[in-house]
Amino acid sequence: MIEKIEELILLLLYLTAWEEEPFKGIRAFRSWKGYPFEALDALEEKGYISQGKYKSRSKSVILTEKGIKQAKQLENKYLGEDITGH
C-alpha cells in the first residue's frame, strides 16, 4: 500500500509541476510539496525528487529526470495516456 501511495504522490507532483527557466542549462520541473514528509523523503531516496539543500524551509521540490520518467510511466499506468504534455 505504501508503494502505491508513493506512486500516486509522485504522479500528482508531476501533474501539478511547472517548468522553470533552465538554471545552468538544466531544465527544472517544480511542484509544491503538500504531501507527507515521510513519502517525500522516500521519493528523494529513490532519486525521483530533490528537496534541495534546505529541505525543511523549501516549499517546493524539483522532479529529477528519473522522477519525470517514472511519473510518465505512472501516468500511463493509472490514467492510460499522457495528459500533461510535459
Image (cartoon, rainbow, N blue to C red):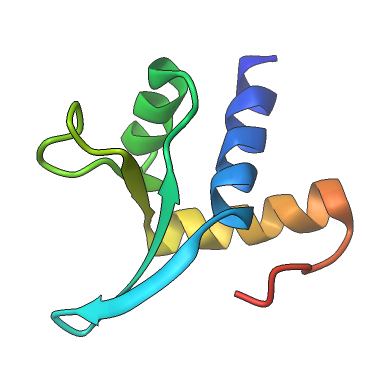
Q: Quadrant of residue 53?
A: top left
Q: In this view, does 22 lie above or below 14?
A: below
Quadrant for residue 84, please give it: bottom right
Tally the marks: 0
In this rendering, is residue 47 above or below 71? Answer: above
Q: Quadrant of residue 21?
A: bottom left
Of residues 72 and 84, the one drawn nearer to the viewer in this rendering: 84
**Closer to us: 53 or 66:** 53
Residue 17 position within the rendered picture, expressed as x and y whole percent measured from the top left: 51, 58
Q: Where is residue 81 in the image (x, y as percent from the top left)?
A: 85, 65
At 42% across and 36% down in the image, what residue appears? Answer: 33
- Residue in view at x 77 percent, y 69 percent: 82
Relative side of 32 to 1, left or right = left
Q: Looking at the rendering, in which quadrant would you find the N terminus?
A: top right
Residue at left offset 65%, top offset 24%: 5
For residue 39, side relative to residue 9 (left or right): left
Q: Where is residue 11 in the image (x, y as percent from the top left)?
A: 63, 46
